[in-house]
């Protein structure tokens, strides 16, 4: 039976039994390249905690973006609570006051943002508790409002960044632009930590921010990899699609669309890392962005899984990625580069029948965290991307009710698209992503699975 007929039957059963299963709100996604003035006309309301330090700076930035502020009598596209002054439990009451009064005025598909400031390492434990409470508040708000297509995130500044206007402008505000835009439609309940580790570039335009950059995307011929290739090229990057020789037709097709290059190699071959290094140096002098997307599944419970299946998943998803990345770090990846590794919520929460896959994807998270520390002196960022239930050809083959269950696990009651993941990759690969390093960005709609 087709998905369409199964879906019709499911709706009939829901109606007959009067099951309380909501119909998801269609997500509004931005199409086309990033443009200056994308937020122009947004209705946004700012609130602040006692002692907060961002109000003036936020007001200046939103005015520059053409955002309409102080529209408390109207429906809002977004609410931002400046919680950088939160130090006590009593301060959290101001968050209740702000959201209690205004949250019903948030439009479907709107955005809720909380901006906090990490306490000094010597701060009292009670201060740490109060700031940590913001994470629980943001995640709960995301769940309460997700049925309306509304997302909520916590943006947490490193201690001392509140007073650094230059770093705010080139780290915080690019992140806010991304989170307020329609490009973050399937990201919800996440914490964006804005770090002091990597110095930002200045005077980087919003449009065409990846011009003159060279990006390598492994597994770039289809699915999330193809979406990432197209999106990076859309913003000005020259993209090299690395995929297996069997994917030649798909790789060439995508490359022609984006005026990119193809490199047909088996990522697990021992000679591949050096061949990639030689290629990028000969043709481009190096590479600026590395997206480690290539991956496979070999599913069985561990009791029934062969050692060959175990090794295949670990070799492709983790070992080959490490060997290729290490080779490029040594010779080929330019300073101020970006490294991204595709993980999964299975790497965070585990998944039945996927011990090998879950291990490899958890390993990817650990690898990116370690690289971020090791490469900070070269101003290189490294982050993991953990997609949730994404509508791909792989998930299309799942039974209808399994798919519907995966969709309903998110706050938004639906699955994401490869383009949702690609937009997250593009943000982290951009100069404006300098404030985010050593982190795992979940693009899962606020899935109930995992932390």
Image (cartoon, rainbow, N blue to C red):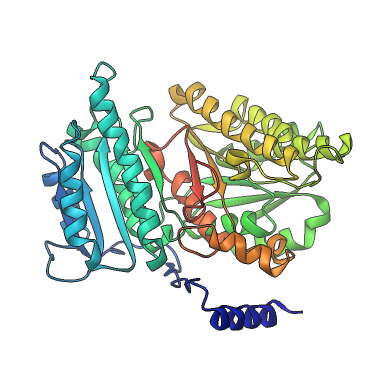
Task: Give coordinates of residue 426: x percent, y percent.
Answer: 48, 51
Do we see residue 292 in this rendering? yes
Q: Nearer the viewer, residue 282 or 263?
A: 263
Q: Is residue 12 above or below residue 119?
A: below
Looking at the image, residue 251 sits to the left or right of residue 201; the answer is: right
Q: Within the image, what quadrant is residue 121 found in?
A: top left
Residue at 37%, 27% in the rendered image: 197
Q: Within the image, what quadrant is residue 44 found in?
A: bottom left
Q: Nearer the viewer, residue 197 or 147?
A: 147
Q: Is residue 22 above or below residue 164?
A: below
Looking at the image, residue 247 sits to the left or right of residue 258; the answer is: right
Residue at 29%, 51% in the rendered image: 113
Task: Give coordinates of residue 41: x percent, y percent.
Answer: 22, 69
Task: Give coordinates of residue 285: x percent, y percent.
Answer: 59, 37
Q: How many marks?
A: 0
Residue at 80%, 32% in the rendered image: 271
């Amino acid at each position: 039976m087709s998905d369409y007929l199964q879906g019709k039957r499911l709706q009939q059963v829901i109606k007959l039994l009067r099951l309380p299963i909501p119909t998801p709100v269609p997500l509004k996604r931005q199409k086309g390249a990033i443009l200056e003035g994308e937020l122009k006309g947004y209705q946004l309301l700012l609130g602040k905690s006692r002692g907060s330090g961002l109000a003036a700076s936020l007001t200046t930035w939103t005015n520059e973006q053409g955002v309409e502020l102080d529209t408390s009598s109207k429906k809002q596209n977004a609410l931002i609570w400046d919680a950088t002054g939160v130090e006590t439990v009593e301060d959290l009451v101001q968050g209740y006051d702000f959201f209690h009064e205004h949250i019903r005025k948030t439009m479907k598909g709107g955005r809720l943002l909380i901006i906090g400031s990490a306490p000094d390492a010597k701060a009292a434990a009670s201060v740490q508790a109060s700031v940590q409470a913001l994470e629980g508040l943001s995640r709960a708000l995301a769940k309460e409002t997700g049925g309306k297509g509304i997302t909520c995130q916590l943006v947490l500044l490193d201690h001392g960044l509140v007073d650094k206007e230059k770093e705010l402008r080139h780290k915080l505000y690019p992140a806010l632009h991304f989170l307020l835009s329609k490009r973050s439609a399937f990201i919800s309940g996440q914490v964006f930590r804005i770090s002091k580790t990597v110095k930002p570039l200045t005077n980087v335009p919003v449009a065409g921010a990846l011009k003159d950059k060279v990006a390598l995307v492994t597994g770039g011929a289809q699915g999330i990899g193809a979406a990432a290739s197209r999106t990076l090229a859309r913003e000005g990057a020259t993209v090299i699609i690395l995929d297996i020789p069997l994917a030649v037709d798909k790789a060439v097709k995508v490359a022609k669309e984006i005026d990119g290059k193809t490199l047909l190699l088996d990522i697990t071959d021992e000679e591949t890392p050096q061949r990639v290094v030689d290629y990028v140096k000969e043709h481009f002098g190096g590479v600026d962005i590395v997206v480690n997307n290539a991956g496979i599944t070999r599913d069985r419970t561990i009791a029934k899984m062969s050692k060959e299946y175990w090794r295949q998943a670990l070799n492709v998803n983790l070992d080959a990625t490490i060997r290729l990345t290490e080779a490029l770090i040594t010779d080929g990846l330019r300073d101020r580069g970006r490294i991204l590794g595709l993980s999964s919520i299975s790497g965070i929460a585990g998944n039945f029948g996927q011990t090998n896959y879950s291990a490899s994807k958890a390993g990817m998270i650990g690898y990116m965290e370690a690289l971020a520390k090791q490469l900070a002196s070269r101003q290189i960022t490294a982050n993991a991307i953990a997609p949730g239930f994404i509508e791909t050809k792989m998930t299309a083959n799942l039974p209808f009710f399994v798919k519907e269950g995966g969709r309903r696990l998110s706050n938004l009651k639906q699955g994401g698209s490869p383009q949702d993941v690609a937009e997250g990759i593009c943000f982290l690969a951009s100069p404006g992503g300098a404030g985010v390093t050593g982190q795992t960005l979940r693009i899962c709609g606020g899935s109930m699975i995992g932390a």
